[in-house]
Image (cartoon, grey):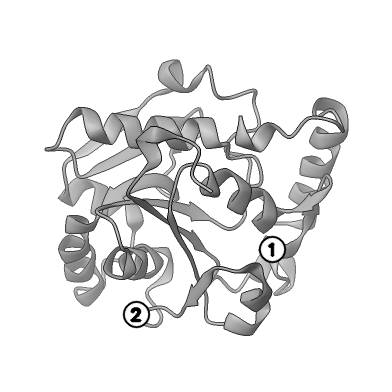
Amino acid sequence: MVTSPVGLYVSAAILAGGRARRFGGADKASLPVGRARIIDRQLAALSAVAGDICIVSHDPERYARLGVRVIPDAIAGAGPLGGIYTALVDAAHERVLVIACDLPFVTAAVLERLVAESRRDEETDAVVPRSARGIEPLCALYRTRCAAAARNRIESGALQVAGLLDAVRTRVLGPDVLAEFDDGSLFENVNTPHDHERARGWVELNEKPSKDRITE
């Protein structure tokens, strides 16, 4: 249920189409972090700010019980850029939040900020965080009009997501803006078993059992 007024008429997509080679092909989205799986944590955060949510995946059966639409890639073999393109052409609303399935600590608060920044300037095509490690294009907001640029790049074989940001009008939110939302874990991803153990350890040290921080 959408609880944020700025999130009305916003779509969202979780990109779960990767092969997880560094994780032995495991379903990263279903890994437990704290009391919930990564995908459950993400759906809780997204549900607070978006009224239309889907999962982009080649394996619909895996997520069939979650109560959200599961859609295949519109263009096979195009990687994360293909996932973004799929989310954009499927979306019911003009603004689309996109999250990679291996980010367990993304919160509703930072997603709400992405939406709000998009609404500040109608000329902006994409709003993308920049953390200490760099641009975070797989935790970002794209407007559906970015779909044409994404498809052009896919058809030309230029699959780097960063290239899409160069092709559209992008607003970058730097670490100074993100500081109020980031306790050091916001963009931590789970790509390897070691990452998973680190994420679980972070929860044990920093998340109180009685408090659900993902919807804050």
**Is disc 2 surrounded by few (<14), some (14 to 19) or many (20+) residues within 10 Å?**
some
Residue located 42% across and 64% down the image: 80
Q: Is residue 165 above or below residue 16?
A: above
Residue located 31% across and 67% down the image: 85
Dot placed on the residue nearer the N-terminal end, 1 or 2:
1
Residue topped by disc 2: 74
SS at mark 2 in the image: loop
**Is disc 1 surrounded by few (<14), some (14 to 19) or many (20+) residues within 10 Å?**
many
Residue topped by disc 1: 28
Q: In this view, does 188 lie to the left or right of 163?
A: right
In the rendering, at what x and y percent does residue 170 appear? 22, 39
Residue located 65% across and 32% down the image: 185
Q: Is residue 78 above or below residue 136?
A: below
Q: Say which of 40 and 165 sits in front.
A: 40
Residue located 45% across and 35% down the image: 4
Q: Is residue 192 above or below residue 208?
A: below
In the rendering, at what x and y percent does residue 71 appear? 46, 77
Q: Is residue 59 left or right of residue 128?
A: right
**Disc 1 and disc 2: Cα gap in Å?**
22 Å
Label 1 is placed on what type of residue?
Lys
Label 2 is placed on what type of residue?
Ala
Q: Say which of 103 and 23 sits in front.
A: 103
Q: In this view, does 195 lie above or below 29?
A: above
**Disc ID at residue 191:** none
In the rendering, at what x and y percent does residue 66 appear? 65, 68
SS at mark 1 in the image: helix
Quarter of the image with the C terminus in it: top right
Q: Is residue 120 left or right of residue 58?
A: left
